[in-house]
Image (cartoon, rainbow, N blue to C red):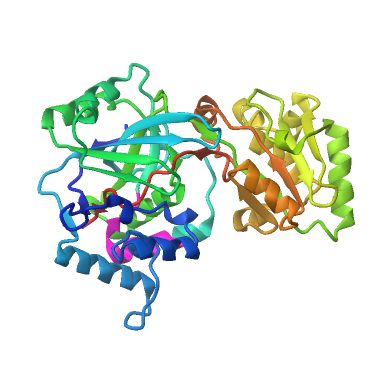
């Protein structure tokens, strides 16, 4: 089973860094160069300088530059390491993309790195090769987990929430409101008895990676590369119960480019939609369909006509035929059906195209996806429904990974609240 341990965290010294909001950052994979610069304007010690390093005149290797900065900040006392191991509770108050206000609670720990498998740690999405190489180089240089993986555990009786209740009721170690308006509060809890009870509560529970597959696969590669036993055999995770009231999955919409001058693919797409879907014209404001079960239902719009349509698969048997040999849970997954029936069908995208985003893009908000169609950045878009947590879990239990970006867990877990040294 998954082995969960407290950690001797490396964290910002609150006397040297009174504002955590000035030094935390979103995960590396959602930060562009404009946002990176804005984060560093708030503080030269913003974690983005380590997590998305850049070369300097004195150090042209950006990964070596990150390692040098980490050593400097530690020597200066900007970052300090705890003497004793602890769990770190995290509470996030937020308003999601659906406009609902929620609170999500979990905790930071270090988790032993294992192969994927039943009773241990399971992925739920396929990954891209590029980010894994980048994260491995950064880990090799810094020998530190700078950014946590976000994972889920099953706790129907809410035992862990009860054990952490006293921590959440006390004065937090720190609080930071991020650019999305999410209020992040953290508590350090080092009580050995409580930690043991949390470990016992999760002793028979497997973990499901919600966000951070690239980081976890990097951790596996790094642990094997170093070899032997030690801190490098563990990875920093933020753990949330699947039953937590604040846990919700949002969809990631698919956008396609390269069709404007390709009449053959345009006609093939139109023929497939007419053959397999019931099509109804709708308002642009209604492009995202309401949550529901099989068969696939999606919104569709292209940059030429700019008319919005609701497309409902005529029968689940069509999806079953497009995904032969796949588990039932996978054949009812909207992203999997869309990929097999449309993206790899009339649009002709290959696995390599999907992995390297050749002709394919993603959007996590309805407004952004629509804007990218109306301004011609992309040629067409497919607006999807969210995948329920139970469905994510059911697919993961089969050992089959979902297509990339099948889920969007909001809010993201910020980088910079706690770090986990690996040496």
> With 356 as the anchor, is 200 left or right in this view?
left
Residue 118 position within the rendered picture, expressed as x and y whole percent measured from the top left: 42, 31
Q: Which residues are magenta?
A: 133-147
Residue 243 position within the rendered picture, expressed as x and y whole percent measured from the top left: 41, 23
For the N terminus, the image quarter is: top left
Residue at the (88%, 36%) spot, across then down: 274
Q: Nearer the viewer, residue 170 or 211?
A: 170
Q: Image quadrant of residue 143?
A: bottom left
Q: Main secondary structure of the magenta part?
A: helix
**In the image, is residue 144 above or below residue 323?**
below
Q: Image quadrant of residue 323?
A: top right
Residue at the (14%, 36%) spot, across then down: 190
Residue 341 position within the rendered picture, expressed as x and y whole percent measured from the top left: 75, 39
> With 216 as the anchor, is 75 left or right in this view?
left
**In the image, is residue 321 above or below residue 144?**
above
Question: Is residue 139 a member of the stretch shown in magenta?
Answer: yes
Q: Nearer the viewer, residue 352 or 35?
A: 35
**In the image, is residue 136 above or below residue 243?**
below
């Amino acid at each position: 089973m998954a082995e969960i341990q407290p950690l001797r965290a490396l964290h910002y010294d609150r006397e040297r860094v009174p504002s955590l909001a000035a030094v935390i950052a979103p995960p590396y994979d959602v930060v562009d160069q404009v946002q990176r610069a804005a984060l560093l304007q708030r503080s030269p010690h913003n974690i983005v300088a380590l997590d998305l390093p850049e070369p300097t005149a004195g150090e042209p290797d950006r990964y070596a530059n990150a390692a040098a900065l980490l050593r400097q900040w530690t020597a200066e006392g900007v970052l300090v390491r705890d003497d004793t191991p602890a769990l770190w509770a995290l509470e996030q108050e937020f308003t999601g993309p659906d406009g609902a206000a929620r609170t999500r609670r979990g905790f930071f720990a270090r988790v032993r790195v294992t192969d994927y498998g039943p009773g241990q740690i399971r992925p739920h999405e396929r990954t891209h090769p590029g980010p894994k190489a980048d994260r491995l180089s950064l880990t090799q240089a810094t020998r530190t987990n700078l950014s946590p993986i976000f994972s889920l555990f099953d706790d129907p009786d809410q035992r862990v929430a009860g054990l952490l209740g006293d921590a959440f009721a006390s004065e937090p170690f720190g609080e930071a409101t991020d650019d999305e308006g999410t209020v992040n509060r953290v508590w350090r809890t080092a009580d050995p008895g409580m930690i043991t009870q949390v470990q016992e509560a999760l002793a028979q529970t497997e973990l499901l990676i919600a966000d951070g597959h690239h980081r976890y696969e990097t951790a596996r590669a790094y642990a094997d590369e170093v070899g032997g036993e030690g801190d490098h055999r563990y990875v920093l995770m933020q753990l949330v119960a699947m039953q937590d009231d604040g846990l919700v999955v949002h969809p990631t919409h698919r956008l396609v480019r390269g069709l404007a001058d390709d009449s053959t693919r345009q006609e093939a797409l139109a023929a497939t939609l007419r053959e397999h879907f019931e099509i109804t014209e709708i308002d642009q404001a209604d492009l995202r369909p309401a949550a529901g079960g099989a068969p696939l239902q999606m919104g569709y719009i292209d940059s030429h006509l700019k008319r919005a349509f609701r497309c409902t698969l005529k029968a689940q048997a069509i999806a079953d035929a497009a995904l032969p040999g796949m588990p039932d849970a996978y054949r009812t997954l909207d992203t999997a059906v869309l990929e097999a029936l449309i993206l790899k069908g009339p649009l002709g995208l290959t696995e390599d195209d999907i992995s390297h985003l050749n002709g394919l893009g993603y959007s996590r908000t309805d407004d952004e996806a629509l804007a990218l169609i109306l301004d011609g950045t992309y040629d067409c878009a497919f607006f999807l429904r969210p995948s329920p947590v139970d469905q994510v879990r059911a697919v993961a239990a089969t050992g089959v990974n979902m297509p990339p970006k099948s889920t969007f867990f909001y809010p993201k877990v910020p980088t910079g609240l706690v770090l986990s040294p690996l040496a």
